[in-house]
Image (spheres, rainbow, N blue to C red):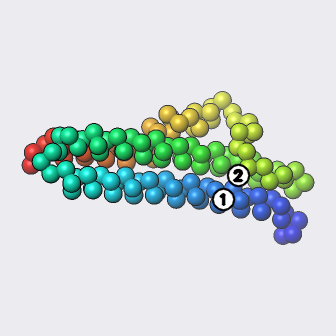
Amino acid sequence: MGEHQNKIGHLNMIEGIIDRMGHNSFSLKQWAVGIMIAIYAFAGENSHKAVIVTIIPLIVFWILDSYYLMTERKFRCLYDEVRKKEEKNIDFNMNYNSIKVGMKDVSKYCLVKVAFSKTILPFYFVCIITTLIIYFVKF
């Protein structure tokens, strides 16, 4: 156990960052829903004017959430690289930009591709569609 102490310490540091990225992503989703509900509650008869006020924060949260997922993916790649290193080569470097990525994997780390991934797109798509339905369809 003691012979891999540096590697374990470095992997724990990376795991902590990955955990924070996941938590930040979840918090953004909570905030997005909370702001939607608050705007719905205060819109009243001015619902047509409030569409922009609702959709703009949703788009901002969508971009931020995509950024956190993209960063989480980069740290997962760093984790995988550190996992494969020899103990003597552990330098506690947290820079994920120094990792060599194969051409087939490059798109996984693109913000636009992440924004339209199956883990991000459905949530924000449903939020935006729900907003449009609530404001434009009279029940």
For badge 1, the amino acid type reads Glu
Question: Residue 15: which numbered mark, if any?
Answer: 1
Q: Secondary structure at mark 2?
A: helix
In the displayed structure, 70 sits above or below 41; it is above
State which tag comes first along the sequence, 1 or 2: 1
> Is the residue under label 2 in contact with that under label 1 (CB below 8 Å)?
yes
Q: Position of residue 94 (x, y in %)?
A: 73, 49
| Residue at x-position 84% and y-position 52% | 91
Q: CA distance from mark 1 to mark 2?
A: 8 Å
Amino acid type assigned to the residue bearing label 2 in the image: Tyr
Percent of width and height locating residue 58: 36, 44
Q: Nearer the viewer, residue 119 or 133?
A: 133
Residue bearing mark 2: 79
Residue placed at 70% from the left, 43% from the top? 96
| Number of marks | 2
Write the residue at 76% across / 58% down: 10
Residue 133 seen from this side: no
